[in-house]
Each structure stands twice: as C-alpha cells, then as structure tokens.
Image (cartoon, helix red, strand yellow):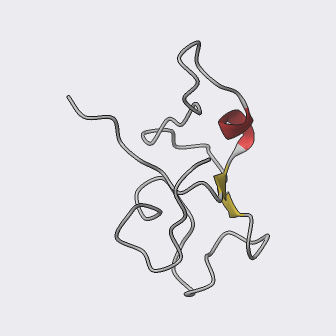
Amino acid sequence: MATRKFCGLLRTKTAYYRTPDGERRFDPDSTTACYTCLLTQRPFGPDGEPADADSCGENRGCYEEER
C-alpha cells in the first residue's frame, strides 16, 4: 500500500509529531482536526480551497512536497 502524500504546508495539532519512521501524523478520518495552511495561516489555501487532509495533496497547484 502506497503512503499517502500530504502537502508539506498543511498543519494540524498532531502534524507536528512524527512516527518513528519520520512521517507526520495525520488522521484523515478525524472529525475534530482543525487544519491550517502555512502559506495563508488560515483554514484554506492560497487557491481559496479548504486546507484539510482530503484536499491538500499532489492535485493542488499550491502543493509543496514535504522536506
């Protein structure tokens, strides 16, 4: 199973922590997560679309690979 890629600019409270393998901890199924885009500092990206685990992937023009 391929690892799902999230935008390097997407943040939520748990996204600041990493697994032992170095991956950020996102729970896309969480009903309480509040997401923020680091570019806008808001719950939406620079394209006006929502910043969340379902939306912020490689399909967005503002997507940045995690470093």
- Give the residue drawn at x 40%, y 57%: 54
Decide if residue 59 is on the left or right side of residue 22. Answer: left
- Give the residue drawn at x 68%, y 47%: 12
| Number of residue marks | 0
Q: Position of residue 62 (x, y in %)?
A: 53, 77
Q: Nearer the viewer, residue 45 or 8?
A: 8
Outermost residue, left side: 1
Query: In this rendering, is residue 31 above or below 14?
Result: below
Q: Position of residue 24 (x, y in %)?
A: 59, 33
- Give the residue drawn at x 58%, y 19%: 19
Q: Nearer the viewer, residue 23 or 29?
A: 23
- Give the residue drawn at x 74%, y 40%: 13
Query: In this rendering, is residue 39 above or below 16?
Result: below
Outermost residue, right side: 41
Outermost residue, front side: 67
Outermost residue, top side: 20
Decide if residue 41 is on the left or right side of residue 60. Answer: right
**Which quadrant is the N terminus positioned in?**
top left
Decide if residue 44 is on the left or right side of residue 38. Answer: left
Query: In this rendering, is residue 17 above or below 42?
Result: above
Q: Nearer the viewer, residue 21 or 10?
A: 21
Q: Position of residue 25 (x, y in %)?
A: 58, 30
- Residue 23: quarter of image: top right
Q: Position of residue 37 (x, y in %)?
A: 68, 65
